[in-house]
Image (cartoon, rainbow, N blue to C red):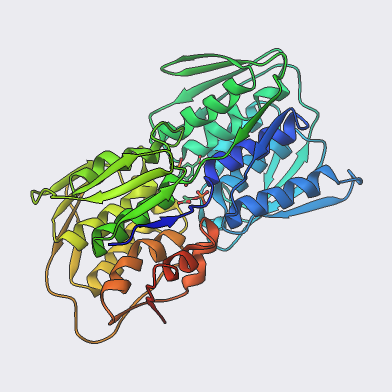
Amino acid sequence: MQTKKVILPGSKSETNRGLILQHITQGKFKVENPSNAADSRLLMDLLKRIENNGNLEDTLVLDCGPAGTTFRFLTALCAFTPGKYLITGSARMKERPISDLVEALTLMGAQITYQEKEGYPPLAINGLTPPKKASTRVALNTSSQFLSALLLLSPFFEKGLEIKTIGKGGSKPYINMTLGFLEMLGAQIKVSDTRYLMELKEHRACSYRVNPDWSAASYWYLIALALDSSIILSGLKKESLQGDAILTSLFKSFGINTHFTNEGARLVNGEGDNTAFNYNFSDCPDLAQSFMIACVLTKREGNFAGLDSLKVKETDRILAMQQELAKIGWRLEEKPNGDYHLYQESVIPKSEVVISTYEDHRMAMAFAPLAILNKNIAISNPEVVDKSYPNFWKDINSFNLKPKFA
Ligand SMILES: O=C(O)C1=C[C@@H](OP(=O)(O)O)[C@@H](O)[C@H](O)C1
Ligand SMILES: C=C(OP(=O)(O)O)C(=O)O
């Protein structure tokens, strides 16, 4: 079989961190090859508007649409950028909690008020000149993006930033990615169980070339699994700041081996396990939907733990998966301990099934291989992929695959 090459989008998480640091350090940190994800394009545009904001008395309205990291990172940035801001977003963004970040920023002296519902966007911010030194505390249980947003402010505070953490949370690799970026800039970082101490006196000039997005790679592993096709994911490297690179070891148990070459990652099909799949996704929540579909494709039951944060993402991803999996005969059932058991109840119906995507890019991309395999399955609102992977369907078409849209 002919091997096909895919050029993945750049990592949205790497790009968004890089763009914020590029802005704060006035270009000492440079981002090369930024992602074309809609969320990153939007952050770029909004940062330009902040940079060109000549009138500090008029309110600058920053609409982040559905982009979570964009919203959270900009909230922290604007809190310490002189000017008046109204940060808002999509209807779903107004349901995604923000109070832990607002409280942490308020403890640092920030002036932020809720404009609609207490604890949720939109926010009015009276941006202040950053003090030389700051300290605060932040809860970790809702989203790691809050701690990342605060850490990214480190270059503002030449005499140091101290952040105490409350409780435990997931998505730790994303926090480590943030620290990795700050280290490139020359930060001295002391981390203990409950405290981050950042010192960043001089900003080291550096430029960072954004790597391909590992979360996006997961959809190609699913295609490889569905079609037994030979795929090279260009430029993907084994070593990555992206925690979702863990997927190579998880897909091994589904029979997909990854060989790293000069070209990137070559996916090679082999023999998979047929025992139940078990994994805790709290550190890689964006992969959970992909592995549910991997179970469906291989008719393997699964135990999914660590899914709490899925409820507050682009949609309630647990509910969305339960509803859409049910349409094809699979059940995602909550167990008394809060884990989820995934198993097949009946066969895929012969009549047409339309998979709703809930304004969630990951719903569309995860279900794509099923729509490719089964002509009765159609994907609604396929354009949602723009959020992280604008060329997804174009890349699929380049394999001569034509999933049905509804
Ligand atoms: O910091 C980041 O770039 C991200 C952190 C994660 O969010 P949570 O920390 O809310 O889980 C992840 O789901 C999101 O897609 C990107
Ligand atoms: C959760 C995600 O993004 P965000 O929180 O940045 O909207 C995602 O891309 O899956």
Q: Quadrant of residue 305?
A: top left
Q: How many marks on residues? A: 0
Q: Which is more toward the observer, 376 or 356? A: 376
Relative horizontal placement of residue 44, taking residue 335 as reference (left or right): right
- 139 or 279, nearer to the observer: 279
Spot the residue most to the left.
Answer: 275
- Quarter of the image with the N terminus in it: bottom left
**Residue 51: x %, y % from top left:** 82, 42
Asked if 356 appears above or below 89 in the picture, the reply is below
On the rendered image, what quadrant is the C terminus found in? bottom left
Residue at (54, 47) in percent of width and height: 10
The correct choice, above or below, for 304 with respect to 66 in the image is above
| In the image: residue 262, left or right of residue 298 | right
**In the depicted structure, whether residue 245 falls above or below residue 61:** above
Does residue 329 appear anywhere in the picture?
yes
In terms of image quadrants, where is residue 50? top right
Q: Nearer the viewer, residue 187 or 92?
A: 187
Question: Residue 18: x percent and y percent?
Answer: 63, 36
- Image location (x, y in percent) of residue 55: 91, 46
Q: Residue furthest bottom?
A: 351
Can residue 332 be seen here? The reply is no
